[in-house]
Image (cartoon, rainbow, N blue to C red):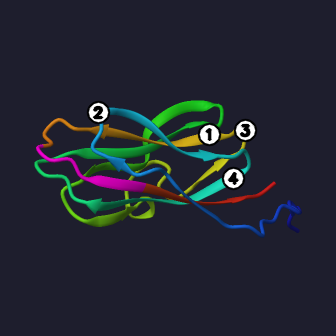
Amino acid sequence: MATDLYSNSFSDNFRLAKSKTFAGGAAGVYNAIRIPKHAFVFDVWVNVFTAYTGGGAVIVGYTGNGEVADDNGFITTLVLTSLATYRSVEGSGARAGGMYFKDASGVITFTYDDTSVSAAGAFIVFCAFSIII
């Protein structure tokens, strides 16, 4: 006979958030989207709508949840030279399949590298999540 571990934790909400537009800018780590405690992040996207020339790369991760920050937890290195939308669930980041912010709120971050950029482009980070308590 199975032991019951039922829960009354259900979600009836869906939230889609976006960062501000990042156009060019200096290399570094940027906070993109705030994530509340008890949120389950199930997908993260990077939408490149103006391609970079000569390079430019971004990785997408997180900080918070009472954990050590993981700079590429959702999306590992993307080269921004093509107009495209990249999804975490299609990648190999440790949290690409999703992450539950159980212990504390957090932030979706991205790290931008402009090492070989000759002309900067622009992109937006999107994140889909539900809050479940």
Amino acid residing under circle 3: Asp
Q: Which mark is residue 54?
A: none
Of tags 2 and 4, the one toward the viewer is 2
Return the residue at label 4. Answer: 39
Q: CA distance from mark 2 to mark 4?
A: 29 Å
Q: Earlier in the sequence, mark 2 or mark 4?
A: 2
Q: Which mark is residue 103?
A: 3
Of tags 1 and 2, the one toward the viewer is 2
Amino acid residing under circle 2: Ala
Nearer to me, 122 or 42: 122
Please give the range of residues in magenta: 118-124
Q: CA distance from mark 2 to mark 3?
A: 30 Å
Return the residue at label 1. Answer: 106
Q: CA distance from mark 4 to mark 3?
A: 10 Å
Q: Which mark is residue 27?
A: 2
Q: Is 131 drawn above or below residue 59 in the view shown? A: below
